[in-house]
């Protein structure tokens, strides 16, 4: 409980402080709702992309099995790999001041060395793992976005709760105490004035 001097000016200052705190709480409450909505939207997209990643992982495993069956493990290990695709910088955007990242499409890798024994199975395996790489990068960026959003939501939640449950009640209690003390002082002043008049009249 804060200590305040029971004056009208102190009561006015506390009333102004309460008004600003209420405005701050309304802002934080609205921000909290916006963050919650964005978290739910991003989480829905993340789950869809994660389900696609699981399916693409299964496709890549089947393509790998087909390539191994066609070439054998030893020959497949010697199969010329494609150069790694170039990865552009993530696309940056902002949401309530937070940086959100999205994966751009991977640029096609340049052609590698020609295989001695090319096959559709090996090419399908290469394509499946290139798709898997792109999806893994995308899902990683989406996970990072969710972590930043959740961290900001928790920070906003703590600030809103501090205003609503600690600071505003303290100011309300201080204003109530000042009003009570001022009322008491005014009643005492009225009693002293009446008593003084009655004494003067008795003389």
Image (cartoon, rainbow, N blue to C red):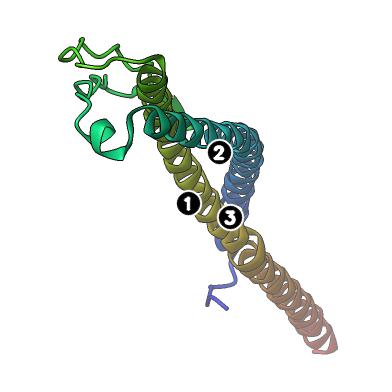
Front-most of residues 72 and 104: 72
Quadrant of residue 105 in the image?
A: top left
The residue to which callout 2 is attached is 54
Give yes or no for contact between labels 2 and 1 (Cβ–Cβ under 8 Å): no
Residue 189: image location, x then y, percent = 72, 76
Q: Residues within 10 Å of mark 1 (few under 14, many from 20)?
A: few
Quadrant of residue 164 in the image?
A: bottom right
Q: Is residue 33 toward the left or the right of residue 63 in the image?
A: right
Q: Is residue 8 toward the left or the right of residue 151 in the image?
A: right
Front-most of residues 25 and 146: 146
The residue to which callout 1 is attached is 151
Q: Is residue 129 above or below residue 160?
A: above
Q: Mark 2 to mark 3: distance in Å?
A: 34 Å
Q: Residue at x 84, y 89 (%)?
A: 202
Residue 92 seen: no
Front-most of residues 62 and 193: 62
Residue 199: image location, x then y, percent = 79, 88
Residue 143: image location, x then y, percent = 47, 42
The residue to which callout 3 is attached is 157
């Amino acid at each position: 409980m804060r200590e305040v001097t029971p004056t009208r000016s102190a009561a006015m200052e506390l009333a102004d402080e309460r008004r600003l705190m209420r405005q701050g709480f309304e802002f934080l409450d609205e921000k909290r709702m916006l963050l919650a909505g964005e978290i739910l939207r991003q989480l829905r997209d993340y789950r869809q992309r994660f389900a696609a990643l699981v399916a693409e992982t299964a496709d890549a495993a089947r393509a790998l099995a087909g390539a191994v069956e066609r070439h054998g493990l030893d020959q497949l290990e010697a199969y010329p790999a494609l150069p790694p695709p170039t990865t552009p910088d993530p696309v940056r955007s902002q949401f309530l001041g937070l940086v959100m990242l999205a994966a751009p499409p991977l640029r096609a890798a340049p052609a590698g060395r020609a295989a001695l024994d090319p096959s559709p199975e090996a090419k399908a395996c290469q394509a499946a793992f290139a798709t898997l790489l792109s999806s893994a990068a995308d899902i990683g960026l989406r996970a990072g976005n969710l972590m930043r959003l959740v961290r900001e939501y928790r920070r906003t939640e703590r600030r809103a709760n501090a205003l609503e449950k600690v600071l505003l009640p303290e100011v309300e209690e201080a204003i109530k105490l000042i009003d009570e003390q001022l009322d008491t002082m005014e009643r005492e002043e009225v009693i002293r004035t009446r008593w003084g008049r009655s004494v003067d009249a008795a003389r």
